[in-house]
Image (tube, rainbow, N blue to C red):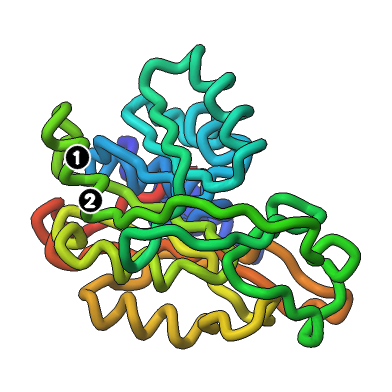
Amino acid sequence: MVATIKKWVIRLCRRLGYEIIPATRIMPRSIGTHLVSLFGLLGTTCVFDVGANTGQYRDFLRKEVRYTGLIVSFEPVRKLVEILREKAQSDPGWLVYHCALGAAVGRQSINVMSAETLSSFLAPDNSATDLFAPYNVVDHTEDVEVRTLDSIIEELRARMDIGKNLYLKMDTQGYDLEVLKGAEHSLAMIAAVQTELSCLALYKNMPGYVEMLAALDQKGFQLSGMFPVNQDTSLRIIESDCVMLNSALVKSAGNRLMWTM
């Protein structure tokens, strides 16, 4: 009876010029919807939030994605770390590290921009787009600790159970490729990666979106979603969040995503 009614409704809608599409076949319109499905599929146990700023991504995970597991945030700028640590007091599942992640352990000078969300190890370059020119200028520099994701994961696993299906989110203003270089031994445990691709460079010598996609593809990650972050006045995409899946782990999880709206 139900099947008959469904067929009748589908035929009627087609006569009226509409097509009914099952919810499971609709791609999500936002990265939040995407991650709700993705985290459910993968059974994500720990999220590494590299480039935490003041904790916007943690708030997004808790409120929009409804993720309740462990979040490990990394932020090198001193003023922002103080804000993070204050906020983390009310969330026992949130760890905050005062350091940057990179290709090797050491210390490095970071450019703290007028808009602190734009702070980077790289020098600003506003020649491709001037949309952020008033804010993407160096206010001061800070000497910061740099660690590798490999060393962090080894340290955490000695202290607690962080599970096996890890999620790596990177928003380091042109330094994401360096973070990947410091995760060579850990990538097998990373179920998915989120990186902010640069379509129009905001910094000197930063890798473009083609280079980042090629690097992740070479590591065995496959494209899952693209979500533009901002555009200039000519509607060119400046940056886009990109989610990529570890192909080996996805196969073990069923090799299929079920999208819900």
**Picture residue at 34% right of the left edge, 81% below the top:** 215
Amino acid carrying label 1: it is Glu
The image quarter in which residue 59 lies: top right
Number of marks present in the image shown: 2
Which mark is on residue 155?
1
Amino acid carrying label 2: it is Ser
Q: Position of residue 36 (x, y in %)?
A: 41, 40
Q: Position of residue 11 (x, y in %)?
A: 49, 58
The answer to whether residue 60 is above or below residue 92 is below
Q: Is residue 3 left or right of residue 97?
A: left
Q: Position of residue 38 (x, y in %)?
A: 34, 48
CB under 8 Å between callouts 2 and 1?
yes
The answer to whether residue 189 is above or below residue 197 is above
Q: Is residue 7 left or right of residue 230?
A: left
What's the distance in space between the residues labelled 2 and 1, CA to CA?
A: 6 Å
Which mark is on residue 151?
2
